[in-house]
Amino acid sequence: MTNHQWRLASHPQGMPTLETWSLHEAPMPEPGPGQILVRTQWLSLDPYMRGRISSSTNYAKGVGIGELMQGGGVGEVVASNHPDWKPGDIAEAMGFGWQEYAVLTPDLPGAAKANKVDSALGPPQATLSWLGMPGLTAYIGLFEIGRPKPGDTLVVSAASGAVGQLVGQIGKLCGARVIGIAGSDEKLAWCRSVGFDETLNYKTTNDLSAALAALAPGGIDVFFDNTGGPIHDAVLRNLAVGARVAICGRIALANDFEQEDIGLRASSRLIVTRALVQGFIAFDWWHRRGEAMARLAAWHREGRIQTKEDVLDGFERMPEAFLRMMTGRNFGKQLVRLKA
C-alpha cells in the first residue's frame, strides 16, 4: 500500500497556483512506540497556511520545497502502539499534513498533541472548525484582547469565515452590537441570519470608512481584524476612545503576501483614541483549548451559535480548496473530505 501526499513544489510569490504543490506516492508509514497510524478522513484549510509556504520568516517553521504540506486533520486509527488508543478511535491533530495516512504521537505537548474526538459534542470535522483551532482563535481574540462589553460596537472582517462567523456570534452573546464585513451579499445575509446587527459588502461599498462612520457614529469599540489591508485602514479611522483591536490575519494580502502591508499610518489616531492594537497567535494559547471548547460546545448545544462549512470531496482537490479559501470563494469553514 502507498500513501499519497501533497508536497510543496515551490515557494509562491503572491497568490499560489495549483502548481505550487505536487502529488507524490510514499511508502505506507508505520507507527513507532507510543504512536498511532491514522487514515485521514477530513483535512482543514486555514489562512495561516499561506505563511507556512512563504520563504519569508514567520512565527513557525515553514514548509521546505519537497516537504509534506502542513495542516490539521481528522481520521480513524487503523493501528496503535499507544496503550490509550485502539483501532477505530477517531483522532484530530494539527500535525496530519496533506496525506492519506499519518503517524501521530498523542503524548506530544501543546498543539502537536493528538486528541480523541468526542462525537457527543459534534461531528468529527467540527474539531477542525468551531470545536478546534478556529474556535480557539475567536474565543481568545475576543476575550483576551477585544473584551466586548454590553453596548460596545464590534466590527469583524471576513465575517462569514471559519473565525469571523464565531466572533460575531460570541460578540452578540457578550451584548455587543456587531457589524460584519465580507465580500458577497449572500455571505452577509447569512451573517444577519445568525444575529449580526449590520453588514457591509466591501466590494460594493464605495467609501468603507464613511459607511462605517454612519453605522457606528460613536466609534468602533472592538475590531477583530482577519484581513488587514484597506478594511483595516477604514476601521482604524473610526475607532472609539479606548478601542481594542485584535490582529488575527491578513487574508486581503494574499496577492502580495511577501510585501509589507502599506496603508494608513495610524499612530496619531491611536494616540487620540488611546486604543490597544495587539496581534496574537492561537497556538500561544493552546493551554486554554479545553476551556474554550467546553464553552463553545455548550453554546452550540443550546443553539446559541451556528456555523457553516464549505466542503470539497476528494484528496486530489487540496490545492483547489486552498485557492478557494485564499480568494474568498469559500462560504464558511473550508474543508476537504477524503474518499472512504
Image (cartoon, grey):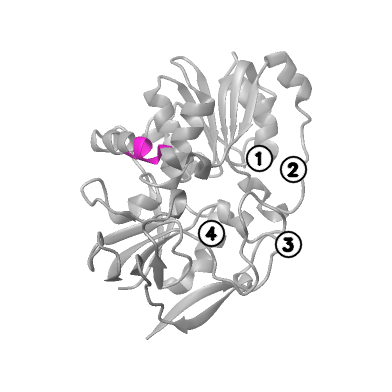
- Residue occupying the point 40% across, 19% down: 175
Residue interval drawn in magenta: 288-293
- Residue occupying the point 63% across, 70% down: 20
Tag 3's secondary structure?
loop
Q: Earlier in the sequence, mark 2 or mark 4?
A: 2
Per the rendering, the mark at residue 13 is: 3
Per the rendering, the mark at residue 261 is: 2
Taking depth in this image into account, of 200 and 160 the one nearest to the observer is 160
Q: Main secondary structure of the magenta part?
A: helix
Residue type for callout 4: Arg
* Residue at image mark 1: 228
Q: Are marks 3 and 1 in contact (CB under 8 Å)?
A: no
* Residue at image mark 4: 324
Q: Earlier in the sequence, mark 4 or mark 1?
A: 1
Q: Is residue 236 left or right of residue 41?
A: right
Counting from the top left corner in percent of width and height, residue 327 is at: 59, 55
Q: CA distance from mark 1 to mark 2?
A: 8 Å
Counting from the top left corner in percent of width and height, residue 143 is at: 46, 27
- State whether residue 262 appears in this view: yes
Q: CA distance from mark 3 to mark 1?
A: 18 Å
Residue type for callout 1: Gly
